[in-house]
Image (cartoon, rainbow, N blue to C red):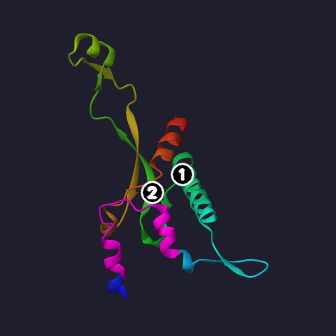
Amino acid sequence: MQKKLKNKYKQYKDKYVLTKQIYNSIRENIKVRGERGDKYLSYKDYTAILTAYLDKMVEEVAINQEVVNMPLNLGSLFIKKLPHKRPFHVRMDLEKSNEINELVLYKVPILDDEYTKLVWERPYKYSKFKVLPLNKFKRKIKHER
């Protein structure tokens, strides 16, 4: 049984797994008690629960600046402030580049002393995993500054 499960998830090693695929693989195992009897959890309810959990996690990490321990020993998420290593970054001027038909670059100073980074300390076996609600984290962090 264990070998069968390992082979099943090996096919997704370097790919994203969609929420719908996860739901389809576990939907027979999730039942909800109701007034009239047990029923299967719908996909709409499943995504609502998952979204609420991720929103709460984003709020805890980005706004409250706390360390969140992920379930099933997946590690912990937190925000770390790091100093900039370079005083400027390079931007491309599209309008001038189109006028001259050459690439026009200019240096823009970095005004902040430090930048904010989302860190996921995870065990080695999850080293290739990514934090998927990253866009939500970026928006919340930018809003809090």
Residue at the farthest left position:
102
Q: Is residue 8 above or below residue 94?
A: below
Q: Earlier in the sequence, mark 2 or mark 1?
A: 1
Q: Position of residue 134 (x, y in %)?
A: 45, 48
Secondary element at tag 1: helix
Q: Is residue 129 above or below residue 97?
A: below
Magenta-tinted stretch: 5-26
Determine whether label 2 and label 1 are within 8 Å by CB.
Answer: no
Describe residue 113's horizontal placement relative to residue 37 as left or right.
left
Q: Which residue is mark 1?
A: 58
Label 1 neighbour load within 10 Å: few <14, some 14-19, many 20+:
many
Q: Which residue is mark 2?
A: 77
Q: Position of residue 119 (x, y in %)?
A: 39, 52
**Residue at (59, 65) in percent of width and height:** 43
Q: Quadrant of residue 96?
A: top left
Secondary element at tag 2: strand
Q: CA distance from mark 2 to mark 1?
A: 10 Å
Which amino acid, mark 1? Val
Q: Position of residue 33 (x, y in %)?
A: 71, 79
Residue at the farthest right position:
35
